Structures are given as structure tokens and as C-alpha cells.
Image (cartoon, rainbow, N blue to C red):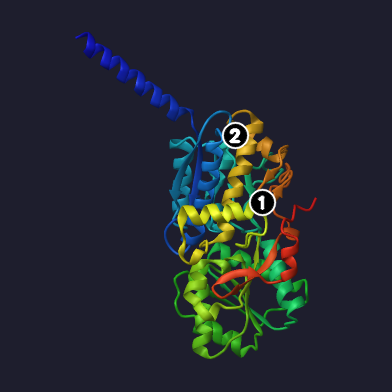
Amino acid sequence: MKNKIKSIVIAMALGASFSAFAADTIKIGVSGPYTGGSSPMGASMRDGVRLATAEINTKGGVLGRQIELVERDDEAKPERGVQVTQELINKEKVVATVGYINTGVSLASQRFYEEAKIPVINNVATGSLVTKQFLPPEFADNYVFRTSANDTIQSALIVKQAIEVNKYTKVAILADSTNYGQLGRADLEKALAAKNITPVAVEKFNVKDVDMTAQLLKAKEAGAQAILTYAIGPELAQIANGMEKLGWKVPMIGSWTLSMGNFIDNAGKNGEGAHMPQTFIQEPNTPKRKAFIDAYLKAYNPANGRIPSPVSAAQGYDSMYILAAAIKQAGNTDGVKIRQALENLQEKVDGVVTTYNHPYAHDDHEAITINMVVMGKVQDGHVVYANESDKAVAVREKAK
């Protein structure tokens, strides 16, 4: 009888111990599309976050506690993103979240973090409105941060490549019908207007469309010298392949998503030469980047040795290190304290994209400035530097 009681006591003690350990972790949400057409971005981001978290936990975690990732697939659907966000906040009790790949999902969902005073770091979504939803005077404090290059930056670089570098005077815009595509299209038109250029055609298509003939014919008949794009991998491939079917080939210059693996693979030779802005290109030109690339390839062994979405992976990795530094500085997991730490981060964070030295301020929640972004191009099934000179300045810090 005594042995039986002793066993019960030990079991209860072990159960309490395990419960205490589980409760003592720091829960961080990771929200993104891990299935569907956006999955190369979502999975790469998640895997970058996992790598950073494993490294942080191996070194003792944060505040003496291990980080526990709570991952959810938002399926690139705004309504699913809202559901996931509420679950992470109300059920899982996350202290912060990293993620959001799709601008539409971000804009629909992140208001719940704002209401709960819990920071969220958008590490892939690029819509210019993402960090501007909750500004003064209506909102005293903004809980939305970003580690990706917003579309104001990207549209300026796309137009610079087309108009200043390539000297085109006639360009067409093809953008998908999502928030991402249409907000990006608007940014492109503004950037073109600043150069006194009006696009000769502006065409729209839906996600999962497989025939771009009508849109491409309008661009061709209007004399377009280049196609400027705002969409994601599968539909971008349909544009490239559609030009091949028409026997018409002009350059594609578009947002960073032209670097997605499912564009490069599905377009094949038709995608060669496409240009896009990039915060990170999979080349080991710094010790930090080499270590990151080696760790990613060893852990996940992607096909062709190519990260499905290198930008997403790098920005996901960096966002975790920035968040961990903020929690450490805050000294606890209170959302207000973490936000305040993010806005006045004292520790330099050695990231893959850059070294983050005061990446944010109270009125500036963008970690990336235009000087930090380079142009990439598709060459032999990989994204490489479009300009060799960009390799010489591997780490570009935020403009102050």
C-alpha cells in the first residue's frame, strides 16, 4: 500500500513538473500559408523561424526559458487568418507572433494583436498599408512591425530598373486581384507617374488562373516593352509561359515574388532573366549567410539545393532574433514592454539580411529601407545578383 501511495505521489510530482515546464515556455505564434500556392513563402519563413529558435533555445532560451513555437497554417485566406489569430491570442496565449505572408491576410487579422496589445512582426507581407493601419491620433501605439521590404520600396526599384536602367518608355502592368496585387499595382502606377510614365496596359487576373492570353495580347498590342508584375509564383509562371505560347517575349520585372521556387520551376526557360527586388540572395557572401544557408540546407535538404523562398527564410530567421532581443530587454513577456523594447532596441542583432541597429522607433516600424534592397535575376534556375557590384557591399544597414 505504501509503495502504491509512493508511486502516486511520484506520478503527481512528475506531472506537476512537466506542467510547470510547459507553462514556463515562452509561446510565440508563427502564422503563414504552409499549403497552396503561397506555401514556398510560408514554409520557408517557418523553417527560418525554426532554425533561429533552435539556436536560441540551445543557448539557454530567453530569460532562462525556452521558446515554444505555435505554428498555424492560415492557407493564405483572410478569413482563416482571422480564425488563426484569435486562436493564437485567446487559446494559446502567445506573447507575440511572427509571420503573415500575404498582405490580405495581414490586413484582415493583425487588428486583433493591436487590440490585445501583443506585438506581431510581419516578416514577409509587403503591402505598404501593413504597418500603417494603427497610427496616431486614432491609435496611441502601434503593435505591428515588419522585417520585409514594403511595396513602396519595391515599386520604386521595379520602375527604376524598367525606366532608368533599361530605358523602356512603354510598360504594361499585370497584377493579381488580391489585396497584394492591387495595392502593389497602385504603388507601381504612382512610381511610374513620378517618372511621367503612364502604363500602356493595366491588366488583372485571379489567383489560380491558367490562361493569361487576353491580358498579354492587350499588352502586346499596346506595344509594351516590358511586363511589370505583382502576383505570386504559380500565376507569374503562367505569364511567362503565356508569352512563350504567343511567340512574344519581353522582360518580366516585378515584385520580390519572382524569386519563388514555384515560379522558377513552373516557368523553366521562360522565366530566365526575370528581375525582382531582394533583401537576401542565396549566396554565402558573409559568414552569417554561409552559416544560415548551410544550416537550412542540412536541416531541410531542399530540391536543387535551393531554398524555396530564400527571402522568406532569411526574414523569418531574423525576425525571431529581433523578437528574442526585445523580450530579453523587456525583462518579461508583457506585450507593452516588448513593443517598447522593439521601438528602442539596445542590442545589435546580427541577422542574415543585415545587422539590425535600432531597427524600429515609436513612429517607424519598418526595419528595411530602400538602400538595403538589391535587384536579383533568375539565371539557370536560381536567383543571382543582377548587378555584380552589389556583391561588394554585402551588408547594408538601415538608413537613418
Q: Is residue 157 above or below residue 336?
A: below
Residue drawn at (48%, 45%) of the image: 85
Q: Residue 189 lies in what quarter of the image?
A: bottom right
Q: Please give the residue where the numbered disc 2 appears in the rendered image.
A: 335
Mark linked to residue 132:
1
Residue nearest the viewer, comparing 243 with 140: 243
In three-dimensional space, the C-alpha distance between marks 1 and 2, rounded to whole angstroms, equals: 19 Å
Viewed as shown, does residue 27 lie left or right of 151?
left
Q: Position of residue 242 (x, y in %)?
A: 50, 83
Q: Is residue 389 visible?
A: yes
Q: Residue furthest top?
A: 2
Q: Is residue 332 above or below residue 247?
A: above
Viewed as shown, does residue 258 lie left or right of 39?
right
Q: How many discs mark residues in the rendered view?
A: 2
Within-10-Å neighbours for mark 2: few <14, some 14–19, many 20+: many
Mark linked to residue 52:
none
Q: Position of residue 27 (x, y in %)?
A: 50, 36
Residue drawn at (55%, 37%) of the image: 116
